[in-house]
Image (tube, rainbow, N blue to C red):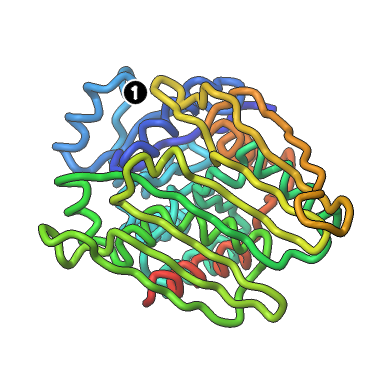
Amino acid sequence: MEPIKVVQYGTWGYTHAEHTMLTMRNLPKYFDVVGLCEPDQNRLKAALNRPAYQGLKIISKEELLAGYDVDAIIVESAEVEQADDALIFARAGYNIHSDKPCGASDEVFAELIKTVKEKNLIFQNGYMYRYNPAVVRATEIVRSGELGDIICVEAQMSQCYHGGMRRWLGDIPGGMMFYLGCHLADLVYQFMGQPSEVIPMNTATELEFPDVLDYGLALLKYPHGISIIKTAACEVSGDARRQLVISGTKGTIEIKPLESPFDLPGAVCANKISMTITRPGHPTMFADRPETVTFPPYGRYDGMMIDFAKTVAGEKENDFDYDAELAVHKLLTKVCGR
């Protein structure tokens, strides 16, 4: 395939924007990065001092909206603004990759999905765990029926933020559940679908920032099971305990940790991750038969971005259709308690 031509709009993301740009520039087989569009001059100045953005052509928003020779826009603006920005570019006829969770408004997100659907455009939301090799393998196992009926998904993803980062969470609806819990809502939806009931419990743990929802838990009820989402901004070594447990009537999959540490450049998860599959043994306690599968190091964003490029180029169908993206966004609103 020919590499697709892209422009990144925005440099806001905590790490996603920079890592995504580095990933694309490290994959010239799939991406021709034409330039960068950052309307905020302060952010632009800061970005151009970082290796990921050096040497890029600077393109104005007006130039893009007037029509530019690119296949897709990579939306990396602020979380609450992403859907509005993506909608503007979709209306202009561009395929869209947006950083997660693509805005806080269900109404704007629904209009975005309606627009890309009507225009037959590709839309990808930046949930990179969909392409985590252990999650991909777990998905194959679940779809094969090997685990039987899925009755529970336990998804956990936390961090330990301080100062400005913790304060910033107060500016977004749902706080930590919106910021990181969106990944977990997406994973639960992939394995169990839309729940019949959601019980959100999001709270503030700090006296310094009493309005910041930095700890979140949500119970998702299904006709034949229940799932649990937990995320926190105040958990020491929380990133090391990110995990996914999928329980079925015939077995259980554990991915602990969900990913290994990564560093710039390239956002490569340098350590191996493991997935344990446990199947029933004899009908007695502690007689189960575990099997551990180990995956080699991988680029955190590689699978996601390569999939987007192939889909835009017509090499494959989109694995996550419009309706599924809309359903995940609606589920996120529920687990945030909105």
Q: Which of these two is toward me, 1 or 65?
A: 1
Q: Looking at the image, which residue is at 35% across and 45% down?
A: 159
Left/right placement of residue 2 relative to residue 265 reads: right
Q: Looking at the image, which residue is at 55% across and 58% down?
A: 186
Q: Looking at the image, which residue is at 24% across and 56% down?
A: 169
Q: Which of these two is toward me, 191 or 274?
A: 274
Residue 18 drawn at (x, y percent) = 36, 32
Can see residue 217?
yes
Residue 289 drawn at (x, y percent) = 82, 44
Q: Quadrant of the N terminus?
A: top right
Callout 1: SS: loop
Q: Residues within 10 Å of mark 1 (few under 14, many from 20)?
A: some
Residue 207 drawn at (x, y percent) = 12, 62
Residue 175 drawn at (x, y percent) = 30, 61
Left/right placement of residue 108 relative to residue 330 reads: left
Amino acid at the residue labelled 1: Leu
